[in-house]
Image: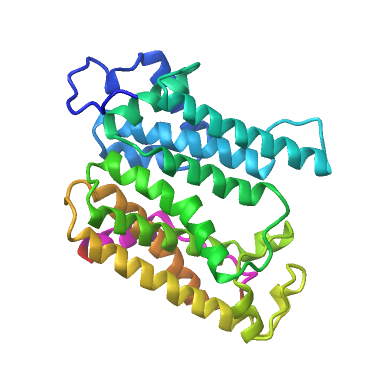
Amino acid sequence: MTDPIRTHDEPTPLGCDPADLARVEAIVRQSGTSFAAGMRVLPSYRRYGMYAIYAFCRIVDDIADGDTPSSLSGAGQIQERMAQLEAWHARIARLYNDETRDALDRVLHAAIRFFALRKEDFDAVIDGMTMDAGSPIVAPDEETLDLYCDRVASAVGRLSVHVFGDSSEHAKRVAYHLGRALQLTNILRDVAVDARTGRLYLPRDLLMRFDVPADPQQVLVAPGLAGVMRIMAARAQDHFREAFSSMKKCDRRAMIPARMMGGSYLAILNALERRGWDHVLTPSPVSKLGKAAGVLRAFAA
């Protein structure tokens, strides 16, 4: 691959065809999340770099969750998902050999060159999705849970901080801690939803410590579940604190999107803690105002 581009004087973001940029942005907007709006704070070339990363993540996540069209079921569908994710490893490898085939390829390739994105981080994301694509994860050991969080969240963070404009060691620490904070918050928020699909991301050692069965069908009514959730929430809070502390040592402007994301997710975790861990079946929605307040607190952290 050629050396990363260090300057940008192209007439369009990342020097890409406007039609390619529009196709990638459409993938982001069709996902129905607030991600596109959140990235509006970025200059256009960084924004489209993030759109490309998000589109990649969205597609491989849909494969892992079985949300892509398939005529197969059961073991056949699982094998199909694994093959599709393996194909993405090959597709990423082609990009690093300067081979592109469609709009997403071309915008991803431009982002890879412009921001010096690491192939290992794309591969880690795919490997994380592969962990979800096979048999459901049920009560992993601590090492497996941490590896999962690193792959599906912190690896995305490592890609993102490069696009945001800071590739320092401190920025890598932000990715490490913020990724884990966000993923643990997701696990805590979605424990009931995951249980209905046969998944249980809470670590086996903690479940055993609180006499909680390592069974998605029984975990929600186990008396000791609250103790497990409190410890996991404390871990998430620790990661948020470490992430915000590392942000102070990074480029201030580059960390604006990271602070926004961290603040909105910290608001979710705080709402879950206010609801209490004895009521995991009770929703704890956070209003836009609540998330905005969380973002403001993140900028003050």
297 vs 211: above or below? above
Say whether residue 196 is magenta.
no
Q: Which colour scheme is used?
A: rainbow
Q: Is residue 67 visible?
A: no
145 vs 75: above or below? below
Image coordinates for residue 284, horizontal then vertical, percent: 53, 66
Can you say which quadrant of the picture contains the N terminus? top left
- Span highlighted in magenta in the image: 280-299
**Which residue is at 44% across, 73% downward?**
235
Is 47 positioned to the left or the right of 100 in the image? left
Can you say which quadrant of the picture contains the C terminus? bottom left
Image coordinates for residue 150, horizontal then vertical, percent: 46, 56
Q: Is residue 124 visible?
A: yes
Say whether residue 295 is magenta.
yes
Is 107 positioned to the left or the right of 246 in the image? right
**Which residue is at 76% across, 74% downward?**
218
Is 273 positioned to the left or the right of 170 in the image? right
**Which residue is at 58% across, 65% downward?**
283
Query: Overall secondary structure of the magenta stretch?
Result: helix
229 vs 28: above or below? below
The total number of labels drawn is 0
78 vs 219: above or below? above
- Between 68 and 277, the one lying in front of the other is 68
- Between 280 and 174, the one lying in front of the other is 174
What is the quadrant of residue 211 in the picture? bottom right
**Which residue is at 45% across, 18% downward?**
99
Image coordinates for residue 242, horizontal then vertical, percent: 30, 68
Image coordinates for residue 231, horizontal then vertical, percent: 50, 79
